[in-house]
Amino acid sequence: MRIGGTGIIGGGLGGLAAACTLAARGHKVTLLEKNAWLGGKAAVLEDGGFRFDMGPTILTMPRVLERIFAEAGRELSDYLTLVRLDPQWRCFYDDGTVLDLRETEAEARAAIGALSPRDTRGFDDFMAVAKRLADVSDRFFFWKSVEDLKDTMNLKANMSLSTLSDVLSLRMHRTVAGQIKRNIADPRVRQMLEHFIQYVGSSPLGAPAVLCGIAQMQLGEGVWYPMGGTRAVPVALTRLAEELGVDLRTGVDVTRIDTEDGRATAAVTAEGERLEFDRIVSNMDSVRTYRELVGGATWDSFSRGRTREAACSGVVLYLGLRKAYDHLAHHNFVFSRDPEEEFGAIYDRGEPAPDPTAYIAAPARTEPGVAPEGGEALYVLVHTPYLRDRHDWSRMLPEYRRVILDKLGRAAGMGDLEERIVVERTLTPQDIHDRYKVLNGAIYGLASHGKVMGAFKPGNRSRQVRGLYLAGGSAHPGPGMPMALMSGWIAADTLHQDATANAPVVAAQ
């Protein structure tokens, strides 16, 4: 069936962002989503009067969303109410220490200095590095299709002392952990700052130092909660897409992309329907797009390039409690006793950490309606390795659940947690793999490991297939809510540039 225009495979945040941007620029857009809902991992679970965000729970860099809505001349505030959080995180340690990452840099410095006076200056030094890296990322890395270094800056055309300074600032010889260790002495403060890298599901011991810029993106621009939960973000984007005339089709499972003479021409569904488009955006995992949807010589070519390793996965416990824990903040980290032991287990040995870091979202602090009065709707995430053949989470989950609850009781003052639970649901790496068509159950797309190339993901304009564009957390610029949204905008902007450059010129009458 000839449909024409642009077909978008997958209605996650990247796919919705691409759909809205293209439609705002006048393109005919058809979006195909295999699940019954739009938003991908940003789904919702409701049970027994409790409401849980199932996937991402932390929103940063709201300017990305603002830019997408501005494409259509709309104000984000007309679609979404955002509340800025303070503290951004509350951190719990095995030794009983509690440390808040405060909402402003000055307040964060004061809290860190109260715990470790010698690190006040070190925090300033670290944030100076983070600000420089965030600035370089914004100018050379974001808002355009990037796959490797040559896409970031034209050194031959633009070589100058300023450009050389920007290149050197990337600190390609250092990891995130290495940079933080240079600035910070206290291991507890280090552990907190290293955890910015968990937004991309990677180890600070292997991720490039340029990703320290995430600290400035959060401390400089805030942590925000959309009223209605992070699920409210895809709901707002869906409303915008509908207003712009996007054809949204759920329950449509695309199993193949047809190509002709190296160009994407059609999406083929599990039912055998062939939908022909002028161009295609895939919001499916980038590796699985090439391997499963395109295949053949194209997959061979893609797979001969860089090794693409999945980022980590995770176990999520959705816990409805009859009684709230008043000492929790909206976002909390309960840190492992030994980060090197934790990261070695997850990223080197491919096994669940014996003493993991647990992230807890307690959104009733900001939106009481997520739970019955006096109760709590907790989201508890523990990172795990991506799926291996030896992992059987139907067997592993009960024992690991006990490890997680013991950790929360021991380090976060939640010893009676089991007694408070009235609703409990879970999500395992196998569930994530099956539900979202991601690579090996990865939550965050592809790992960001490697001092030079670790920050680079497959570009938004395919180098293997003309007319194919990539969006989502496994494409440039990477995972996390703002980056997945940005990837959709970049895919749309790149497609629009290509389409208008090749459009026939109509002579004036």
Image: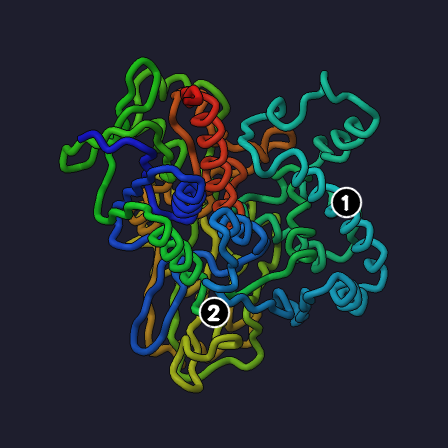
Separation of disc 1 and disc 2 at Cα? 33 Å
Q: Is residue 296 above or below residue 468?
A: above
- Residue 413 appearing in the image: yes
Which image quadrant: the N terminus? top left
Q: Amino acid at mark 1?
A: Val
Q: Secondary structure at mark 2?
A: loop
Which image quadrant: the C terminus? top left
On screen, residue 302 versus residue 178, left or right, reads left
Residue at the image position 81 percent from the left and 65 percent from the top: 113
On screen, residue 45 versus residue 489, left or right, reads left
Residue 425 in picture, x, y percent from top left: 32, 66
Q: Quadrant of residue 31?
A: top left
**Labels 1, 2: front one:** 2
Residue at the image position 24 percent from the left and 33 percent from the top: 3
Residue 14 in picture, x, y percent from top left: 43, 44
Q: Amino acid at mark 2?
A: Met
Callout 2: 10 Å neighbours few (<14), some, many (20+)? some
Q: Secondary structure at mark 1?
A: helix
Q: Which mark is residue 227?
A: 2
Residue at the image position 83 percent from the left and 60 percent from the top: 120
Q: Residue lying at the far front in this picture: please name it.
A: 509
Q: Is residue 385 above or below residue 105?
A: above
Residue to which mark 1 is pinned: 129
- Residue 414 appearing in the image: no
